């Protein structure tokens, strides 16, 4: 961890230094160069000051989210400039060594930096800068309805064509636009699904974060087969310091009660029967279980009395649970619905052709539908945002899944 921190710090410093010299190469007016330097120093000082003011008893708030966004806006483009100009320096040094070895004294060992390269570096750096800026202003509320149809040979006939709307990772403490949230709720209602499921992280940390948004989420209309939810890792208050264990436990109880207040039935390591026309499927909901996060989920307890022949939909917040325990489980969980990753809120997606985010190096299943021997997991990209106050390329999602009986036709 310490080694990684040192590496990142060196990369940031190199980015700052190289960007300064790139600007120096491009601009002619000296006052513009010093204005750039002054603004950069001010931003760095503000970021450092803001992080020193972070209160671990409060946790993430609007200021900390803004600081992270500002840091990314500042650091990422400059690191790109640094990488490009560092690469040019390597070639300049190699070229100088070759010329020196060949005895070419007419050219200096280390030629001056080309203005063109600096312009290219600054131009390329503008791409992530503008993308991150767009993500903070508009991308975080650029809701997309994503639809999937999944076929199961053993789906009870009366559930053929059943639709599920899934939302995940609300993170209400990050919201700052009631109109956009209202629009997203309208999108949920427009799907007219048979079953509505929410797969965890209703807040960042504190139950009170959701209080301004309770009425908005109560507008999610009742579904014929019900509205159910589970907890996510942020719902346990693990990431802040509490004045007492009693206060932490009270916050947890208050968070669980939020689900009741927005008319969702919270499943805590338990299952319910979903009935339709005399047939039934099982909806199983576990508490958070993650390879690298809190493991409060108890799949055995939640599935007590169920058989491999029962058709089961499992709600489990963290998709690493599916990879570690569910996908080859003898009890045969047909469909698992998860969230948690947010797709890192940053990546590139061309539907049907290409999908990438840095988070794929941490999670095998991080966005969309995955299959293993006829068992599926769908990872929702998240309704809200956390950490970086925006989204680039990985947009907030409302998922609609249709269950069909039979085999998928290729």
Image (spheres, rainbow, N blue to C red):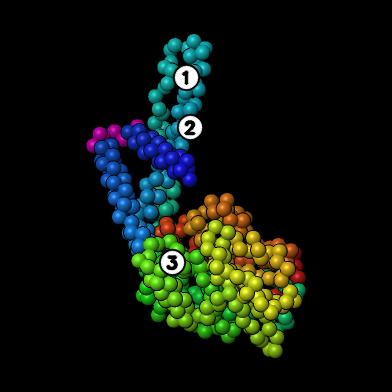
The answer to whether residue 27 shows anywhere in this view is yes
SS at circle 2: helix
Name which residue lies at 52% across and 63% down. 294
Q: Position of residue 80 (x, y in %)?
A: 44, 41
Disc 3 designates what residue? 237
Is the residue under label 2 in contact with that under label 1 (CB below 8 Å)?
A: no
Name which residue lies at 50% across and 80% down. 264
379 in magenta: no
Say whether disc 1 or disc 2 marks the residue closer to the N-terminus.
2
Left or right position of 238 against 276: left
Q: CA distance from mark 3 to mark 2?
A: 45 Å
- Which residues are drawn in magenta? 25-31
Q: CA distance from mark 1 to mark 3?
A: 58 Å
Q: Quadrant of the C terminus?
A: bottom right
Disc 1 designates what residue? 96
Please name which of the two marks, 3 or 2, marks the residue nearer to the observer.
Answer: 3
> How many C-alpha atoms fall within 10 Å of the one at disc 1: few (<14), some, or many (≥20)?
some
Does residue 269 lie above or below 5 as drawn?
below
Q: CA distance from mark 1 to mark 2?
A: 14 Å
* Residue sitting at the far front: 245
Q: Nearer the viewer, residue 127 or 347?
A: 347
26 in magenta: yes
Say whether disc 3 or disc 2 marks the residue closer to the N-terminus.
2
Say whether disc 1 or disc 3 marks the residue closer to the N-terminus.
1
- Place residue 120 in its image quadrant: top left
SS at circle 3: loop
Q: Position of residue 145 (x, y in %)?
A: 54, 69
Name which residue lies at 32% across and 33% down. 24
Does residue 140 lie above or below 151 as drawn?
above
């Amino acid at each position: 961890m310490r080694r990684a921190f040192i590496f990142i710090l060196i990369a940031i410093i190199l980015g700052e230094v190289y960007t300064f010299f790139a600007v120096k190469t491009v601009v002619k007016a000296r006052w513009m160069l010093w204005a750039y330097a002054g603004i950069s120093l001010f931003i760095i000082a503000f970021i450092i000051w803001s992080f020193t003011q972070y209160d671990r008893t409060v946790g993430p708030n609007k200021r900390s989210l803004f600081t992270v966004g500002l840091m990314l806006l500042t650091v990422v483009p400059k690191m790109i400039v640094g990488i490009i100009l560092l690469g040019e320096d390597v070639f300049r040094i190699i070229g100088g060594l070759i010329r020196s070895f060949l005895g070419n004294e007419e050219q200096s060992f280390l030629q001056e930096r080309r203005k063109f390269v600096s312009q290219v570096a600054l131009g390329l750096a503008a791409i992530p800068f503008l993308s991150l800026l767009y993500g903070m202003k508009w991308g975080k509320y650029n809701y997309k309805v994503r639809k999937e149809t999944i076929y199961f040979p053993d789906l009870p006939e009366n559930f053929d064509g059943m639709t599920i709307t899934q939302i995940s990772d609300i993170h209400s403490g990050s919201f700052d636009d009631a109109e956009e949230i209202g629009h997203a709720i309208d999108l949920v209602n427009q799907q007219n699904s048979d079953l509505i499921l929410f797969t965890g992280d209703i807040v960042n940390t504190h139950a009170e974060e959701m209080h301004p948004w309770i009425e908005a989420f109560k507008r999610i209309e009742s579904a014929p087969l019900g509205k159910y939810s589970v907890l996510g890792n942020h719902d346990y208050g693990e990431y802040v310091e509490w004045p007492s264990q009693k206060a932490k436990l009270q916050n947890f109880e208050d968070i669980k009660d939020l689900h009741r207040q927005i008319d969702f039935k919270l499943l805590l390591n338990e299952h319910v029967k979903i009935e339709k026309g005399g047939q039934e499927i099982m909806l199983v909901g576990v508490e958070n279980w993650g390879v690298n996060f809190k493991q409060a989920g108890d799949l055995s307890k939640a599935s007590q009395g169920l058989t491999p022949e029962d058709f089961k939909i499992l709600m489990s917040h963290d998709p690493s649970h599916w990879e570690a325990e569910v996908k080859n489980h003898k009890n045969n969980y047909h469909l698992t619905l998860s969230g948690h990753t947010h797709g890192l809120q940053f990546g590139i997606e061309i539907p049907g052709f290409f999908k990438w985010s840095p988070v794929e190096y941490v999670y095998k299943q991080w966005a969309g539908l995955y299959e293993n021997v006829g068992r599926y997991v769908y990872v929702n990209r998240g309704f809200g945002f956390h950490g970086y106050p925006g989204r680039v390329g990985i947009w907030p999602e409302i998922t609609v899944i249709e269950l069909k009986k039979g085999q998928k036709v290729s």
